[in-house]
Image (tube, grey):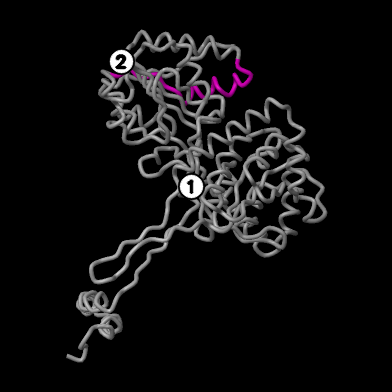
Amino acid sequence: MSEFSVRRLDAGNPDFSSDLDGLLAWESVADTQVEATVADILQDVKTRGDGAVIEYTNRYDRRQLTQATDFCLQAEDLQAALERIPADKRAALESAAERVRAYHEHQLQSSWQYQEADGTVLGQQITAMERVGIYVPGGKASYPSSVLMNAIPARVAGVEEVLMVVPAPDNQLSDLVLAAAAIAGVDKVFTIGGAQAVAALAFGTETIARVDKIVGPGNIFVASAKRAVFGQVAIDMIAGPSEILVICDGKTDPDWIAMDLLSQAEHDEQAQSILLSPDAGFLDAVAASLQKLLADLPREAIASRSIAERGALILVRDIAQAIEVSNRIAPEHLEVSVDNPEQYLPQIRHAGAIFLGRYTAEALGDYCAGPNHVLPTSGTARFSSPLGVYDFQKRSSIIYCSPEGADTLGRVAATLAKGEGLDAHARSAEYRVRNSAD
């Protein structure tokens, strides 16, 4: 492996703010040519349904589909895949699924009501979405963890039907992905991907029922399609490259920290790995560890480019300043590898997931810790949250007025409505007011 250099920044440098902006800059999935192609595919699938799905799938995934049943898998197909996979992998999937399910059960929200003194009842009714679609990358890539993280919260929420789309380019399909679908309780699997799969879920076809929400990661065409159909259906998010930010006091094994950084760098060249530490010698040690450990990675070419182009080792004054920088970045994954990390939680405002302590590797969260690994990226942790049960539930307000309540509220509403010049609103409220003729 050739020598590479990782960017070094100093938070005390006068140019640090602009340097950090440059480091964080990332070209989003917006691309006019891609968006034009996606728009054509969406309209075609909306118009022609299964026929268009088959045509685009054959073209882009090198398939030979002739009818819709060719891309439909049944429950027995999923169960057969579950029985084919090695026993140790099945056990790992089942263990991860159990932990993910147990964690998300804590997120369940219940309907509630309260009654006022005059008998008026106010509240909120919580209901699950009827049908959701999950997108799972396919082909040579195998992401059974994505199946678990997207399908299980939907099931816990009470979603009636979970549909899954997964591309099978050159007819390659992972048994692990199908086995995970069986374990997670997916109802139907369609072996299609790309913008055509998003369109089928959003608009419905003769074979694929229209869903209420689409979740799950995908390439630029999938991301652009999800953005385009938002409003027609709900979506989880438009995800950017994977990110990890590590805050370390310099007392953790540098090999551990280096490998944590590489665990995200190996995703793709655009992934971002950043280390903040007040110990300059430790930053040097981690840089040396990165150089050493990269050589043994099967995805060394991807990881080394990610580290060289988008990674950084940042010297900070102390842990407090590290947290300030972290809050500005709002990372997808934040490791706090320090003594007594819990003491810093109140100061951490923006992060998708927070990993506390020297033994809590981010990779545990990707697979089996329990919390969801679908997390906000590109600074969106400032205003958004991990995927969860709440993403598959919706809330309806409940209002029941007693005669006394209608009298009291009607007078207030009528006054405000007249102030807005909405006479029918005012009269509607006044009809329920006692002695309204007065």
Side of 310 where 33 appears, left or right = right
Which numbered mark, 1 or 2, is in the foreground of this view? 1
Q: Is disc 1 in contact with disc 2, using a CB cutoff of under 8 Å?
A: no
The residue lying at 75 percent from left, 59 percent from top is 51
Q: Where residue 58 sits: x, y (%)? A: 77, 48
Q: Rounded to the nearest whole Å, what is the CA distance between mark 1 and mark 2?
A: 38 Å
Q: What label sits on residue 66 in the rendered view? A: none
User: Farthest bottom residue?
Assistant: 437
**Which amino acid, by three-letter code, is at mark 2?**
Pro
The residue lying at 62 percent from left, 51 percent from top is 162
The residue lying at 56 percent from left, 29 percent from top is 268
Using the rendered view, name the quadrant where residue 24 is placed: top left
Q: What stretch is highlighted in magenta?
A: 297-316
Tell me if residue 116 comes above or below residue 180 in the rendering: below
Q: SS for tag 1?
A: helix
Q: Nearer the viewer, residue 311 or 233?
A: 233
Residue at mark 2: 278
User: Farthest left residue?
Assistant: 438
Quadrant holding the C terminus:
bottom left
Q: What label sits on residue 389 in the rendered view? A: 1
Local crowd size for mark 2, using a 10 Å CA cut-off: few (<14), some (14–19), many (≥20): many
Side of 112 where 156 appears, left or right = right
Q: SS for tag 2?
A: loop
